Structure formats: structure tokens, C-alpha cells
Image (tube, rainbow, N blue to C red):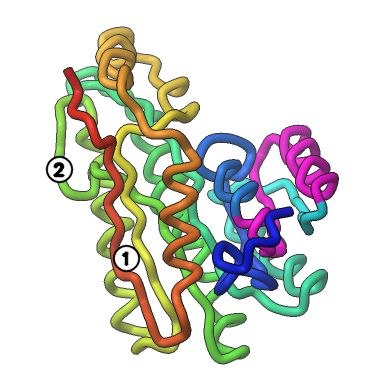
Amino acid sequence: MNTNKQHTKGIEGKVVLITGASSGIGEGAARLLAERGAKVMLGARRTERLQTLANEIRDTGGVAEYRKLDVTSCEEMDAFVNEAVDKFGRVDVIVNNAGVMPLSNLEERKIDEWNRMIDVNIRGVLHGIAAGLPVMRSQGGGHFVNVASIGAYEVTPTASVYCATKYAVRAISEGLRMETEREIRVTLVSPGVTESELADSISDEHARAAMKEYRRIALSSKAIAEAIGYAIAQPEGVDVNELTVRPAKGIN
């Protein structure tokens, strides 16, 4: 584990729940936060990956638990949060990270894919809030970190529905911040193009080829994890509202 106090300050000892933790940004956040002293609870559908990740974190001196989680199920999300409370006694941070991105033009009518994005990208975040908010209220504080995208600010061809879901996450985050009146911190993290498995869900041939070209210059998942860590590490009373993280070099 990293024992550098400069890195662990504000993170060490916090109980952090992460959805979509089996790969990409979720995995990167789990490794970084555990290294800096957080107790991480990992959720995703692929439990074999979660088990491997949790074991690797434990082998380096970190604290990690995991549970199978489909964020589209409100019941599974409730159980995920309840298990974290049972094991650690509280919930300090929920990172609503799980997401899918099967891009296509609207005329392709990939309605099942649209519904999947709505279920995972929007309902998944709402389920995380619904499960975590009563716990955070009862303990007198907490922090939601909702992972959106630069698609929460701009729309591109083939990404209409995906961007709509991320606009929704942005709106939900702002509404939650206003409703909780600063008792609970809310951070929206919007990554630019990032190395992940999101593009693997693109079934449309043309959209897949365009995304491959777009991703020639991409951020590492650790870069987004650092942004998440930055927001979590802020002192009490400081709420980082929004972080947009893009590659430093433009796409050629």
C-alpha cells in the first residue's frame, strides 16, 4: 500500500462503493483508492473479475470486498449497499460508474440497445442514489461521485441516445446537490475518450470503426481514477461539483 500521507489524506479509512468495478474506470478507481487507504466495496456482473481484483488489492495490504451487482436491479443495489454497511459500518462514497455505450445512428432502430443504455446509464445511477441516500442521511453525510462523459455536454452522430443518458446523469447530479443542501457532496466526473471496454458493446460496424479511430489518443483509466480521488480527498465542507477530464493532445 502507498503510505505517503500526502496521497492518503482525505481518502484513508473511507468506505467507497464502486459500481462497474470489474474493468476500466471502475477497476482503476478501486486500485487507486485502495492503495490510498480506502476500504472498497466492488460491484459488477462479472464476479470472477471482481474476485481477482479484490484478491490483488488484499495482497498489497488493501481492504476490499465484492458482490455481484446488476445496477438495473434496484433490489441488487439495495443489497450491495446493505452489505457494505454490514461489513464496514457506514458508506462514505458511492461511485456510480457502471455504463454501456452501444453507438449507432437513430435510423438503425437499435431499440434494445437504447433501452439497455437507459437502464444502465440512467436507472443504474438512480438506483445507486436511492440505495445510498437514506444511509448517508442517517449517518449525517456522504458523497456521490457520478461518472458521466463529455457526452453530457455535447452530442455527436451515432451517440444521440448515449449522450442523452449522460445529459440525464448531469441533471440528476445537479438536482441531488440542490436537494441535499450541501449535507451530502455530489461530484460529476465527465471523462473524455478513455481506455475502457465501453466500445466493445458497439454492434454497428460503422460506429465501431469510427470509435476505433477516435480512440487513437485516449486517457488511461488511472487518469480518471485520479480525478475521482481528487474529489473524494477534499476537506470537509469542500464539494467539487464537476470535473471534465480530456486528453491533453487533440485527436489527429
- Dot 2, how many residues are within 10 Å of its Cα: few (below 14), some (14-19), or many (20+)? few
Q: Is residue 222 left or right of residue 148?
A: right
Quarter of the image with the C terminus in it: top left
Q: What residue sits 37% from the left and 26% below the top? A: 102
In the rendered image, residue 225, in percent from the top left (x then y), is placed at 49, 49
Query: Mark 2 = which residue?
Result: 154
Q: Is residue 92 above or below residue 188?
A: below
- Dot 1, how many residues are within 10 Å of its Cα: few (below 14), some (14-19), or many (20+)? some
Nearer the camera: disc 2 or disc 1: 2
Q: Is residue 229 above or below residue 29?
A: below
In the rendered image, residue 150, in percent from the top left (x then y), is placed at 24, 44
- Residue 100 falls in which quadrant of the image? top left
> What element does badge 1 sit on?
helix
Q: Amino acid at mark 2?
A: Glu
Query: Mark 1 = which residue?
Result: 172
Q: Is residue 100 left or right of residue 104?
A: right
